[in-house]
Amino acid sequence: MQTVKSVWDFFQNEILGMKWLNRLVGNLLETCGLSTETRLGGSVQFFIYDTIKIMVLLGVLILAISYIQSYFPPERTKKILGRFRGIGANIIAALLGTVTPFCSCSSIPLFIGFTSAGLPLGVTFSFLISSPMVDLGSLVLLMGIFGWKVAIVYVLLGLIIAVAGGSLIEKLHLENEVEEYIRNGKSVDIPQEELHFKDRLHFAWEQVVSTAKKVAPYILIGVAIGAMIHNWIPEEIIVKILGDNNPFGVIIATIAGVPMYADIFGTIPIAEALLAKGALLGVVLSFMMGVTTLSLPSMIMLRKAVKPKLLWIFISICTIGIILVGYFFNAIQTILI
């Protein structure tokens, strides 16, 4: 049992967490005369290490997930979802959301297509909630930074929010709150070309390049903010605002995340730095969920597809779910990390 634990710890710390890279960067900076014990040296080390780590993991994850995704083009996904009814359909939609685009702005066009195709509204919303919040990439990244317990609980709770939220929207019968051009839209079944291994690999590599170009600026900004938090903001300030002493920390973090636009890869370095400075686990994860699920740009895009009443119901369901998840993580933090 001890051997298994040692192997897992090595995998989590050295493979996923790439701690060896942090040590290497630190040694190189020390060799160049920049001490990592100083604020500037620590910031440079954090920035170089986290940027390389996240970009490498990003490339590997997107390559693997996009290869899987090649088996689930929109037409096939639509057919799969059309076979199920009731809460089972919501569960399948939430699960399929884990192997689709990595941010909400990329998921909304698929949501529009599924709704136009006549799939139940609640099912499409389960997909829309799950897709940016709990993709497989977030599972692996969270595992590398916060540990496997946090990662698995995060994904499970995200799926619960997606299933519960979609089911509630279905029960409210809000089909008339979808914009008319979508409700009256016609879905055309396009025959799917059979892909071979090389085709799927080519598709996966194109997704890596395309996604890397899109998210690289947000990763750089996120890592820069994380480096500043990690080395320049006093710990007592973070603890006062987002620690044990503030019962509203989860709510503040969730609301703070909404105006931003980033994906899971851009928010993780900020969350990592906040946690290291004394912020509670539920607070940093609520911030991540708020950014990836309820970012202002994605809500503006969604408004073009649904009417204000449905949009606010969606925002309310997600916000309440994220806040509850945040407080739950705060309550069990000592068990998880």
Image (cartoon, rainbow, N blue to C red):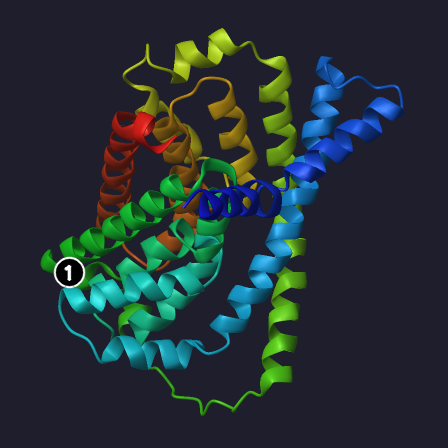
Q: Residue 274 placed where, x, y %?
A: 49, 24
Q: In the image, is 38 to the left or to the right of 29?
A: left
Please, is residue 72 above or below residue 265 in the view? below
Does the image show residue 263?
A: no
Which residue, given by chain and number where applicable, does mark 1 sit on? 170
Residue at image coords 42%, 52%: 132
Please, is residue 158 above or below residue 26 in the view? below
Residue 86, quarter of the rendered image = bottom left
Amino acid type, label 1: Glu
Q: Residue 253 placed where, x, y %?
A: 39, 27
Name the foreground residue: 113 vs 193: 193
Q: Residue 142 placed where, x, y %?
A: 47, 43
The C terminus appears in which quarter of the rendering? top left
Name the foreground residue: 307 vs 137: 137
Does the image show residue 41?
A: yes
Residue at image coords 32%, 63%: 95
Element carrying mark 1: helix
Name the foreground residue: 208 vs 125: 208
